[in-house]
Image (cartoon, helix red, strand yellow):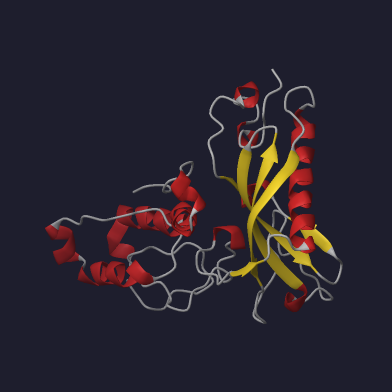
Amino acid sequence: MTDHGARFSAARRTPQGTVEERLPFMSFILPSIFRQKYPRAVNALRTNINRLTTPLDVYATLLSLLDMNKESSTNNANIKQRAISLFNVIPAQRTCDHIKLPPHWCSCLQWQQVNANDIKIKQAAEYIVNYINQLLSTVSRSLCHHLILDSIHSAQMYRPNKNFSAPLERGVRVLTHWNRANDVVFYQITFGTKPNEAIYEATIQYTSRTGSFSTDHTHISRLNAYKSSANCIVRSYPHLRKFCFCIK
């Protein structure tokens, strides 16, 4: 099992690299005695090869191994259940929206290329960089350099359908009774910053009714290595390493 593919190589900046970050490799080698004793579970596992699964399902699978006799291996799993053992059949219609998987990490969405020079893309990229600087300022202005937007490499757009559902936490999909799905657009933007010479891929939500943007640090991926440039916060603020370019 791997947690991700290439993250900091040139390959990461390709469509294949984007998929690899979101679809880690996982394989099972089942003992013959297991296959003989639990054939329905094995069949369910084979069926799930082409179903949407997440680490939460892997966790549920490991728990189920503690007592396989309790596993029903049914086809009746709740489509909105976020943790289903892979020894049970995952619903074929399961989507990222059903299990509240943020668009940044969903590999099932149909993104459309948009002009990277579009004014809305520039505004979105500026918002993300300002958001990053706000995160860094909460640490200490004396530790990390202030970042500026240097370049926009590419941009994609995803517009949710009418089945777009309830809010997510952590900065995206904050919908209310007057803020409908057709008011929301997601942009995925690849951009560079200075002085850290970083390249990021970030997903940001734009709500047209309010003209507002929102994102979260978990929806911003670093595409090139930061190595030792963030050592000043490596122990105290490890979640900000991908953003910080130490002053000293």
Is any part of residue 88 visible from this angle? no
Please give the count of numbered marks on the rendered protein.
Answer: 0
Percent position of residue 170, x then y: 70, 53
Q: Residue extending furthest right? A: 210
Q: Residue extending furthest bottom? A: 162
Task: Kindly identify the residue that appears in the image at 26 percent across and 56 percent down.
Answer: 28
Percent position of residue 197, x then y: 63, 36
**Between residues 82 and 157, which one lies in front from this camera angle?**
157
Image quadrant where residue 237 sits: top right
- Residue 78 relative to residue 233: left or right: left
Image quadrant where residue 49 sits: bottom left
Task: Kindly identify the residue that appears in the image at 84 percent across and 76 percent down.
Answer: 178
**Between residues 67 and 13, which one lies in front from this camera angle?**
13
Is any part of residue 163 visible from this angle? yes
Identify whether 97 is placed above or below 3. Answer: below
Identify whether 150 is placed above or below 100. Answer: above
Identify whether 82 is placed above or below 40. Answer: above
Image quadrant where residue 175 sits: bottom right
Task: Kindly identify the residue that appears in the image at 79 percent across and 44 percent down.
Answer: 130
Task: Kindly identify the residue that appears in the image at 68 percent across and 24 percent down.
Answer: 246
**Between residues 151 and 67, which one lies in front from this camera angle?**
151
Percent position of residue 55, x then y: 45, 55
State the quadrant of the C terminus.
top right
- Residue 188 relative to residue 133: left or right: left
Q: Residue extending furthest top? A: 248
Percent position of residue 75, x then y: 37, 78
